[in-house]
Image: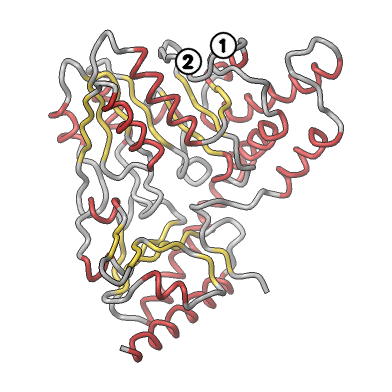
Amino acid sequence: MKPIYLDYNATTPIDPEVAAAMSPYLFEHFGNPSSSHWYGVQTKEAVEKARDQVANLLNCSPDEVVFTGGGSESNNYAIKGAAFANRDKGNHLITSSIEHPAVIEVCRYLEEKDFQVTYLPVDRLGQVDPRVLEKVITSNTVLISIMHANNEVGTIQPITEIAKIAKDHSIVFHTDAAQSVGKIPTRVDDLGVDLLTIAGHKLYGPKGIGALYIRRGTQLEKLIHGADHEQGRRAGTENVLEIVGLGKACEIAKRDLNKNMEHMQKMRDLLYQELKAGWDEIKLNGHPERRLPNTLSVSFRNIEANKLIAEIDTVAVSAGAACHSDAVKVSSVLQAMQLELEYAMGTVRFSTGKMTTAEEVKETAAIFVDTLRRLQGEK
């Protein structure tokens, strides 16, 4: 028996419809999209169809979509590209203290290149305060990068408010939407962003493919130099197979968004209710309402999360802290939220998906409660 999978924020399985759409480009259509003959035309048309599918999900123009090698590359391209393209205007960037490493590490790199970075704090629910953000803007600020939704606790940031502030100050605004695309609405005109990151494997597409939305008029320095692929922005022969997969995944995400949101939230809330019913000392992390519909981060007081998970080989989840013999290493997100150590050390992230069933959820809760009781009895 395979373990129950409740780690959809880490990655998702490929949707069968996505696999079916990709299949001809694995076996039959192998041409280079830059070739002018029949073989090239087939793949060129497939790439442009996928671009349309991504654009339809984001409600933008197809020429504002650039395919990348994944979410990390999209973040790198957005942040480095905007920073270097606007260096003559200033060298100050603003981000948050709870960003994914694919943002934080890029900002650390830019600090070595004489950029200044402000890392905004968050409140105990994991939200950035737009008023605090506006106060740290200077005449040298050229880029703001704030994630749409947090991968660990699911908290959704006030992106539209931040976008208005950025626009009022003529600052480029990027959001890492890898965790939110396909789970909640991500129409770029509603969000007001200039740059938006997509990762294929987070929305039932293949790994190793992503996209970056680039609002018309937004200047970015090239990340990969070479031929004129992707409107001259990203050199390299297109990964047709996976681009087709990402396009189909985006088409399905738009078609089934409301149904999937409702189902994932129902499963998430059922899991929380079942866990609470069986274990009193449980704490919900993240915003209780402004949170991804599939994400449940909970902390069990005075329990070591890694030990708890190690005892359970029938459910796949993620821990928020690593406990060692001499120290407890708590995630930077939980640290930024100032979660008490007695709870932080026992943090587990459950993330439901469109395939999750009520039976799986109830079985998971029963397994965790039984294991918690056993561990408590051993103390």
Residue visible at 25% across and 53% down?
Answer: 125
Specify the amino acid type for callout 2.
Answer: Lys
Q: Quadrant of residue 283?
A: bottom left
The answer to whether the residue labelled 1 contacts the one labelled 2, judged by CB atoms less than 8 Å apart, is yes
Give how far across and how far down residue 198 sits, in percent: 51, 35
Give how far across and how far down residue 96 sits, in percent: 27, 39
Secondary-structure class at tag 1: helix
The residue that mark 2 highlights is: 222
The residue that mark 1 highlights is: 232
**Sooner in the amino-acid sequence: mark 1 or mark 2:** 2
Q: Quadrant of residue 27?
A: top right
Secondary-structure class at tag 2: loop
Question: Gap between marks 1 and 2, in whole Å?
Answer: 8 Å
Give how far across and how far down residue 57 sits, in percent: 56, 33
Residue 205 as seen in the image, left or right of residue 173: right
Specify the amino acid type for callout 1.
Answer: Gly
Q: Which quadrant would the N terminus be assigned to in this image?
A: bottom right
**Residue count near mark 1 (Cα–Cα under 10 Å), binned few <14, some 14–19, many ≥20:** some
Residue visible at 41% across and 12% down?
Answer: 219
Is residue 133 placed above or below 166 in the rendered structure?
Answer: below
